[in-house]
Image (cartoon, rainbow, N blue to C red):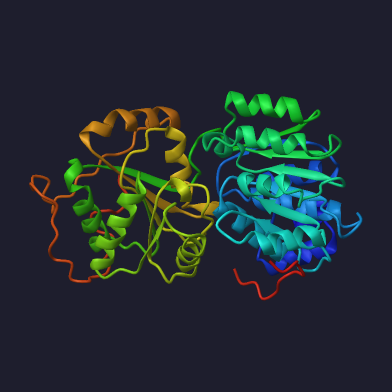
């Protein structure tokens, strides 16, 4: 089914072609008609299913006949990375329209953002904390708000933003269209939905809290002190064109990134100790292929939209099963295929069992015949700067956009 069949405006259909969107994904096919009809919406879907365009396309179309120079749509999302990525997609989809967008995130100067607010950009993408900062200074005006989008609502709950969300919503017009997107539906988010949505359309794509189809998963048992050595071994002996490595802490991410870089790989790091420009450079470098490997904390579990990631490696086992699902969802996006490896120490087997129970399968355990599991200390020698060499031990076990829309300078 082509995008035109969903009733989208020709300028938006043209933008989908230029962004190489071939046909609507399931969530786009189900959500777009309801949003165009003005319905409130609750949508749950796996990562990598195209949900950003699922709300941006109909929101843009609904704003086309509305007055200009006033904010008509507000999109709230938990992290700067997610906000930036939504803004990037928005730029491409809105290119052939007169609609303007503004981005309100922390880590950047307030002045240019205040300028965009005073100019009355039609769409705002914001993180909760920075949006409240502007609201407290009375810089933002939402008297004419038509649509509110809450993206990654469960992640905002996890990050402690629920009180902020309630403060934001209390200052918005009661008559509006509200769209809530969430990978999971914990009780607090379900209660929020009941309070702020009116007779919502329900869209659920795939089994809730399950990995995307196309991901080949494996667990690598290893003593805790040999995890880094095993990771380096996998990188040297496995064909991994684009690798996202997750660590539990920002200190571990920084340390691991430096060790891997010492082996001759191009490596970026992404964690909360970096400034916003540093985080943006890391993401753009990984997205463009300048970095073969990105070492990140869970800040990237939902905030990284890169279609070419071939491998996701968890250096630790997440204690929350949903975190594992979101991590591995960075690969095999948009019906592609990918590999997800998790390095599991004996002390982490219980956490892995909880993950396996949630996803409904036991991960195959892989032991490498040429790795020394009895070494007393992590191996620090032999960096050699060698690149990958074939798919040996880690083999699978038994946008081209040349145009930008008119927008408010920030």
Q: In this view, does 235 lie above or below 377?
A: below
Q: Which of 203 and 213 is in front in this view?
A: 203
Q: Which residue is drawn at 61% across and 33% down?
A: 162
x, y percent for residue 335: 54, 52
Q: Which residue is drawn at 67% across and 44% down?
A: 132
For this view, does 196 lie left or right of residue 400?
Answer: right
Residue 74 appears in the rendering: yes
Classify residue 385 by image quadrant: bottom left
Q: Please identify the quadrant where the C terminus is shown.
A: bottom right
x, y percent for residue 405: 75, 69
Classify residue 178 by image quadrant: top right
Q: Is residue 102 above or below residue 291?
A: above
Q: Which residue is drawn at 28% across and 62% down?
A: 258
Q: In this view, does 283 lie above or below 402?
A: above
Classify residue 400 by image quadrant: bottom right
Q: Residue at x 75, y 62 (%)?
A: 116
Residue 16 appears in the rendering: no
Q: Is residue 18 above or below residue 178?
A: below
x, y percent for residue 300: 47, 51
Residue farthest toward the bottom in the current orientation of the protein? 402
For this view, does 338 lie left or right of residue 116?
Answer: left
Task: Count the numbered circles shown.
Answer: 0
For this view, does 355 lie left or right of residue 2?
Answer: left
Residue farthest toward the front in the current orientation of the protein? 137
x, y percent for residue 212: 50, 43
């Amino acid at each position: 089914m082509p995008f035109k069949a969903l009733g989208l405006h020709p300028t938006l259909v043209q933008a989908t072609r230029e962004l190489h969107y071939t046909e609507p994904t399931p969530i786009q096919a189900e959500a777009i008609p309801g949003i165009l009809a003005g319905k409130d919406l609750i949508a749950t879907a796996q990562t990598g299913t195209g949900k950003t365009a699922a709300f941006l396309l109909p929101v843009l179309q609904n704003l086309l006949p509305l007055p200009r120079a006033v904010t008509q749509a507000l999109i709230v999302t938990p992290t700067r990375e997610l906000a930036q990525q939504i803004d990037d997609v928005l730029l491409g989809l809105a290119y052939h329209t007169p609609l303007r967008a503004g981005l309100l995130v922390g880590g950047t100067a307030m002045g240019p953002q205040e300028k965009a607010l005073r100019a009355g950009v039609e769409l705002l993408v914001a993180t909760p904390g920075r949006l409240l900062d502007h609201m407290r200074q009375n810089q933002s005006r939402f008297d004419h708000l038509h649509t509110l989008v809450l993206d990654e609502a469960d992640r905002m709950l996890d990050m402690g933003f629920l009180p902020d969300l309630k403060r934001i919503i209390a200052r918005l017009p009661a008559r509006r269209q509200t769209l809530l997107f969430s990978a999971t539906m914990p009780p607090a988010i379900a209660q929020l939905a009941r309070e702020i949505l009116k007779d919502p359309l329900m869209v659920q794509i795939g089994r809730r809290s399950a990995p995307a189809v196309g991901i080949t998963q494996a667990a690598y048992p290893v003593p805790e002190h040999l995890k880094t050595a095993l990771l380096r071994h996998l990188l040297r002996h496995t064909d991994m064109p684009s690798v996202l490595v997750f660590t539990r802490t920002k200190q571990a991410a920084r340390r691991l990134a430096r060790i891997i870089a010492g082996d001759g790989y191009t490596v970026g790091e992404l964690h909360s100790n970096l400034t916003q420009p540093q985080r943006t450079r890391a993401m753009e470098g990984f997205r463009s292929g300048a970095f073969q490997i990105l070492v990140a904390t869970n800040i990237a579990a939902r905030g990284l939209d890169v279609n070419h990631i071939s491998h996701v490696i968890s250096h630790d086992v997440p204690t929350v099963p949903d975190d594992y699902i979101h991590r591995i969802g960075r690969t095999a996006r948009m019906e592609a295929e990918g590999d997800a490896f998790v390095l599991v120490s004996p002390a982490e087997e219980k956490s892995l069992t909880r993950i396996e129970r949630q996803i409904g399968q036991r991960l195959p355990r892989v032991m490498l015949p040429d790795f020394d599991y009895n070494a007393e200390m992590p191996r620090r020698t032999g960096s050699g700067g060698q690149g990958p060499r074939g798919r040996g031990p880690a083999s699978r076990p038994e946008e081209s956009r040349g145009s930008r829309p008119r927008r408010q300078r920030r």
